[in-house]
Image (cartoon, rainbow, N blue to C red):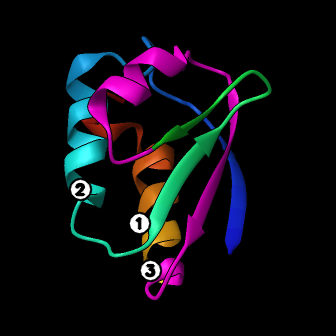
Amino acid sequence: MISKVTTIVNPTGFHMRPAGFFANALAGYQSAIKLKTPAKEVNAKSLMHIIGAGLKCGMTVEVIADGPDEAEALAKAVELIDSGLGEL
């Protein structure tokens, strides 16, 4: 299991469009991928879990990957978050 802390940069947070894009981009990885905030830990491959986490701009999240392709999955998840998912 590996993890990395990053910050949500989307001006309006992870609403439906960026959350759906994020979950779909990670769906092909075999590893379990989670997003952890001080209040919750959710499945990063689930649109509804991501929406339920209430991720807002400026929030710090820990991305956790566990499985056979965890390094690639973690790098992709962090890259997506840091890029703003096309909203910057």
Asked which quadrant contains residue 10, the reply is top left
Q: Where's residue 29, x and y in %? A: 31, 72
Q: Amino acid at mark 2?
A: Ala
Asked if the residue at tag 1 contacts the one at tag 2, i.e. Cβ–Cβ closer than 8 Å, the answer is yes
Q: Position of residue 22 (x, y in %)?
A: 30, 44
Residue at mark 3: 72
Q: Is residue 67 left or right of residue 38?
A: left
Q: Residue at x 41, y 66 (%)?
A: 76
In whole angstroms, how far apart are the C-alphas of marks 2 and 1? 8 Å
The residue under the point 63% across, 59% down is: 64
* Stretch of the chain drawn in magenta: 44-71
Classify mark 2: helix, strand or loop.
helix
Quarter of the image containing the C terminus? Answer: top left
Toward which corner of the image does residue 44 lie, by quadrant?
A: top left
- Residue 83, horizontal then vertical, whole percent: 42, 47
In the displayed structure, does residue 70 sit left or right of residue 24?
right
Mark 1 touches mark 3? (CB < 8 Å): yes
Name which residue lies at 52% across and 68% down: 74
Quarter of the image where one finds residue 57: top right
Determine the residue positioned at 75% across, 21% down. 39
Callout 3 crowding tier (Cα within 10 Å): few <14, some 14–19, many ≥20: few
Q: Is residue 52 magenta?
A: yes
Disc 1 secondary structure class: helix
Q: Please provide percent x and percent y for residue 19.
A: 31, 30
Identify the residue position indicated by label 1 in the image.
Answer: 76
Q: Which mark is residue 25?
A: 2
Q: Residues within 10 Å of mark 1 (few under 14, many from 20)?
A: some
The CA span between labels 1 and 3 is: 6 Å
Circle 3 — which element?
helix
